[in-house]
Image (cartoon, rainbow, N blue to C red):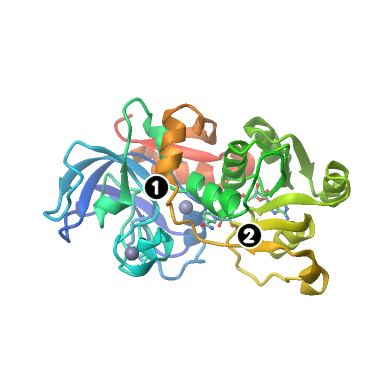
Amino acid sequence: MKALVFHGPGKRSWEDVPDATIQDSTDAVVRVDAVTICGTDLHILGGDVPEVTDGRILGHEAVGTVVEVGDGVQTLAPGDRVLVSCITACGTCRFCRESRYGQCLGGGGWILGHLIDGTQAELVRVPYADNSTHRIPDGVSDEQMLMLADILPTSYEVGVLNGCLRPADVVVVIGAGPIGLAAILAARLFSPSRIVAVDLADSRLDAAKAFGANVVVNSGREDAAAVVRDLTGGLGADVTVEAVGYPETFEQAVALVRPCGHVANIGVHGKPATLHLEDIWIKNLTITTGLVDTYSTPTLIGLVSSGQLDTSPMITHRFALDEFEQAYDVFSRAGETGALKVLLTAGS
Ligand SMILES: NC(=O)c1ccc[n+]([C@@H]2O[C@H](COP(=O)([O-])OP(=O)(O)OC[C@H]3O[C@@H](n4cnc5c(N)ncnc54)[C@H](O)[C@@H]3O)[C@@H](O)[C@H]2O)c1
Ligand SMILES: [Zn+2]
Ligand SMILES: [Zn+2]
């Protein structure tokens, strides 16, 4: 089969590799019908994730068709259309029993395209297949569903649900990349009175408006704090969602929230950020962070299949699987190309 293989920082190629096969009785092998690239894959290629070793097939998001199942797989059969989640779940460890699959102790968690071969391939081995895939309802397109492999559950769980967003709230989303835009889509489910998007790139702010932000702030030339004060009678936002991953944006998320509000950090941080306890100890804030667990995927599938959530605007570029190299090129130059999520499909 062909796959997108990591060969150390800056090196990747679409090349021939041995076919994915069943290794454990709870595995399934899935033929990849639709797959995408995550910002995390760019971090891996940048050398920021040293556990990913030379020869690893990248990718942790896919929609596909089951071609083979191990003897221990109970709920899947060849021919089933499934979503392959970015998080694998053993289903029996202490954290899986609490639906905290991201922290799985049984060999799951974020392993695809990280610790084991991933989804950017013609075939992928999915461990613990019963717990790590979701059946796709009839009538729901592969591309709508693909957005539920990672970005929608991440933004919904780690942003909106951890942020305890409630109807009529003012929510500020800092960072309008795919994750911030997915947070805007997810926030709309809760009827906030205002969604404020903050970014440095006007193109991303245009996208934020198209996704449903009511107010956009280019914090390179506008004062986000003044905008939020004006909107909230000087109090601050009810919820702030950090979707960048820099110290300054985390600190901004804390500074923009009202007393008793929620700060939901989604960003992956590579450097320490300062928590100004000397200012905020008295404000009764709740600050959350986290890796996605994907416990919300069934809810999100229900929302997509009933038409209440439309993830299709997220896909800006389309390729065939054997155009993976070009897809990486376009995705990695998002500033110039305007890419949000790229879609690669088999047989197109
Ligand atoms: N917690 C999780 O489980 C999880 C899962 C996936 C991604 N993430 C993280 O979420 C973050 C966002 O992911 P993405 O794919 O949308 O990234 P991205 O790089 O595409 O988007 C980040 C956005 O932030 C903007 N930005 C940069 N500096 C800024 C600043 N100082 N102020 C305001 N905006 C600024 C950029 O212009 C860009 O639009 C990343 O840190 C990513 O690693 C976390
Ligand atoms: Zn990802
Ligand atoms: Zn587990």
The number of numbered badges drawn on the structure is 2
Label 1 residue near ligand 2, CB within 8 Å: yes
Label 1's element?
loop
Q: Quadrant of residue 208?
A: top right
What's the residue at 56%, 39% (across, down)?
339
Query: Mark 1 or 2 closer to N-term?
Result: 1
User: x, y (%) of residue 189?
Assistant: 58, 36
Rendered image: mark on residue 245: 2
Mark 2, Cα crowd under 10 Å, few <14 / some 14-19 / many 20+, is some
Q: Is residue 160 above or below residue 214?
A: below
User: x, y (%) of residue 327?
Assistant: 46, 41
Q: Quadrant of residue 18?
A: bottom left
**Image region (quadrant) for ligand 3:** bottom left
In the rendered structure, which amino acid carries the disc numbered 1?
Answer: Glu
Return the residue nearer the eye: 4 or 155: 155
Q: Is residue 316 above or below residue 234?
A: above
What's the residue at 57%, 42% (across, down)?
182
User: x, y (%) of residue 272?
Assistant: 66, 72
Rendered image: mark on residue 61: 1
Q: Residue furthest bottom?
A: 278
